Amino acid sequence: MKLTKEQQLVAYSQYHHTVAVAPAGAGKTATSIEFIRYQGNAAIVAFTLTNKAANEIKERLNGECPNVGVSTIHKFAYNLIKSHSNVNYIMLTDSAQLALIQRGLGGDKKLQQAINKFKCKGITPEQSGEPKYSQYEYLCKKGSYLDFSSMAAIATPLVQCFNKIDVLCVDEAQDLSQDQMNLIDAIVKHHNPKVLLVGDPRQAIYGWRGGMDSPFNYFISKYTDSKLLNLTYNFRSSEAICDAGNKVTHLKHLPDVKAGLKIKGFVEKNTYPTADIERMQVVSRIRELRSTGNNGNAILFRTNHQMSRYEYPLIRACIPYEIWGGRKLLDHNEIKCILAWLSLLDNNQNNAALFVAAQSITGIGKVAAKNLTIESAQQETKKQPIINFFDCYVLFLNEYNSNQSIRFAIDLIAEIMGIKEPKLNKAGLVTDKEVKSTINRSTRVDVLADLSEGHNSISGFIEKISMDTDSSEKGDVNKVILSTVHKAKGLEFNNVFVPNLIEGNMPMSDNKGNISDIGEETNIAYVAFTRPRFNLFESTHQEGDTSRFF
């Protein structure tokens, strides 16, 4: 790919610190890769937001730069901790972390989210005002547990142990959290590398989970020798789409984005009497597009729950569709169950794993699981569910020790727990829906078993899949994609429909009409409106107040 003059200024930058603002479709990946190539044999570390992005960069480099390490920040931090920490940590998956909070603190998902957000923002337990945060840290220290939100902070003082970093390239820098920026600061302090930060402030949509207000401004203010460069052309979308993005963004100090290629397209806006009619008309418009061979259509939503309302009209219209609700493999209950049992086999003092595994036994609820240990289960003589739990534990442990095969253990746990067996309804029958659900469960278990191949250590296997398993969407151009805006970030479609553009939905507000962060809500609209290559279809209805973004 031949770079434009703007892209060349970034790729061949002579400045020690460069900050590049790259809008949707600006070719930032190609520019970043050329920047890496230009560094020659320097020791390069490149951070990406996802494993998928890291793999793409590796594939496109094709071994040209032997001294480059490309990974997510979490994976870099994790490897640093494994190599240089004196603590032998036990990795906590998201579900294992929640189990620890439920068992040890009597907390819930909201407490988990609050603690993780504190960590991402670099807020200590003392600063947070949340007493259970301090208690959680105590439990983690006592059990040597490592959760995702702690990785950057734990790795930061270990940066000085890293051999050499001559160049640091950070992709999607607009989504950096404070703890990740602290890690970058430590790298700059101890290694003084040449730095490239690239991203788009207009697409910063992760403040809800701890993203910084303005990583670019922070970096430029701290490192005054930084050079700010703007990429201003979108080589993916039509002029109409570029204009739609320019109009909705609140960051007016940034230069307008221009279409880099002459691509035909339009923005269509419609107002309907009701939400039901809106849904029918959106589906009707998609059917028209498909009848002329115009595929690659997506409907983007502010939240997950809105997607299901479009399934019925799509089914009635005989239009195939795919939901990108995006649960990862590790998020499914049967996988959580198996991983909990595996973790317990690896370490019977892992209380977070025991809490989840015990509840897979009929008759054991949260209260009983909270107070249960392997020792107390072994001594139980009256409560049959507890006895059943210990019998399962002994069976799994003996069989695993005999076979030393993680795949065998996975299949055995799935068989004993009945994960691959269909569940009967109240009438004692198996419904068609349950047959499909059973097939899906069995497939996911088989995928987990396949992933275990080549692993001799349970802890090593769980750590590997925890770090490497993204929820990636490939998509079928013949199917209509239903997705949240967050899920669609970084992707592109031929035609994009953004329905339900009413106040309270986009921008989202609480029951009292309060909007927590209008800047981030505006960025979400910007991301939605800049996903199409060709055409954008905005719609609203008269059952609510029309969105300010319409």
Image (tube, rainbow, N blue to C red):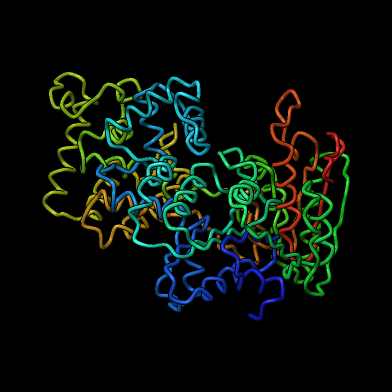
- Give how far across and how far down residue 94 sits, in percent: 42, 40
Quadrant where the image shows the N terminus: bottom right
Identify which residue is drawn at 49% across, 46% down.
Answer: 180
In the image: residue 391, left or right of residue 228: left
Q: Quadrant of residue 103?
A: top left
In the image: residue 345, left or right of residue 491: left
Residue 158 in view: yes
- Give how far across and how far down residue 269 sits, in percent: 87, 52
Q: Quadrant of residue 171?
A: bottom right
In the image: residue 82, left or right of residue 126: left
Residue 333 in view: no
49 shown above or below 130: below
- Give how far across and how far down residue 473 sits, in percent: 55, 59
Q: Is 324 in front, or is 195?
A: 195
- Give how far across and how far down residue 30 sits, in percent: 60, 72
Identify which residue is drawn at 46% across, 44% down.
Answer: 434
Q: Quadrant of residue 378?
A: top left
Q: Is 464 in front, or is 545?
A: 464
64 shown above or below 193: below
Q: Is 137 in front, or is 219?
A: 219
Identify which residue is drawn at 17% across, 34% down.
Answer: 391
For the image shown, how many numbered marks are present on the structure? 0
Identify which residue is drawn at 32% across, 28% down.
Answer: 139
Q: Residue furthest bottom?
A: 2
